[in-house]
Amino acid sequence: MRCPFCFHEDSQVKDSRPSEDGAAIRRRRQCGACGARFTTFERIQLRELTVLKSADRRQPFDRDKLVRSVSIACSKRPIEPAQIEQLVSSIQRQIETSGESEVASVRIGELVMEALKGVDSVAYIRFASVYKDFTEARDFEEFAGSVSEVARG
């Protein structure tokens, strides 16, 4: 593994342990050249996934992009980074085990919304505002009203 500090090609694993409920391995590494320590994560990848975007565009599935998106929706909320990692791992596993190598971006958005609904209503509304392309305050009001009704009923 290349050192992120000096870019030396060789590093040594100092410690390994399960992470994210066993869905990943966390490895502490040390660079043989500069001595810097850093952490890497190793995850199982069942298949190469392609995301189908609008206008028949395709791009490789990017887990980090999904983590960033969910993290933005969850910012300043009482949600731990480990909880976000678990949520994203669960979504990725659902996609990978579907048996398809291509998944529509709309489907990923639906999975995120479903997951966030059970975690935090504010994060759910934040994500929905981008995913559903809210353009006016009225869009927020209507959506928040529907979330409140579901929570009460």
Image (tube, helix red, strand yellow):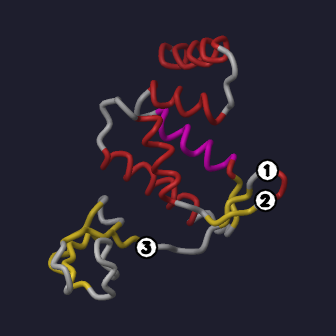
Instruction: Give the quadrant of residue 29.
Output: bottom left
The answer to whether the residues at label 1 and label 3 have Cβ atoms under 8 Å apart is no
Q: CA distance from mark 1 to mark 3?
A: 28 Å
Of badges 3 and 2, nearer the viewer stands: 2
Q: Judging from the image, what secondary structure is the residue with disc 1 in?
A: helix
Query: What is the span of residues highlighted in magenta in the rendered image?
Result: 106-117
**Is 146 a magenta residue?**
no
> Which residue is label 1 attached to?
54
Closest to the observer, 153 or 72: 72
Whole-percent x, y for residue 133 in the image: 68, 30
Q: Secondary structure at mark 2?
A: loop
**Residue highlighted by disc 3:** 44
Residue bearing the label numbered 2: 57
How many residues crowd mark 2 within 10 Å: few (<14), some (14–19), many (20+)?
Answer: few
Q: Is residue 139 above or below residue 69?
A: above
Residue 115 falls within the magenta-colored stretch: yes
Which residue is drawn at the image coordinates 45% and 25% (left, top)? 122
Q: Which amino acid type corresponds to the residue marked 3 in the rendered image?
A: Ile
Tag 2–tag 1 contact (CB < 8 Å)? yes
Dot 2 amino acid type? Arg
Q: Main secondary structure of the magenta part?
A: helix
Instruction: Report x, y in % for residue 148.
Output: 52, 14
| In the depicted structure, whether residue 100 falls above or below residue 126 | below
Question: Callout 1, which amino acid?
Answer: Ser
Q: Out of 2 and 119, give the one closest to the viewer.
A: 2
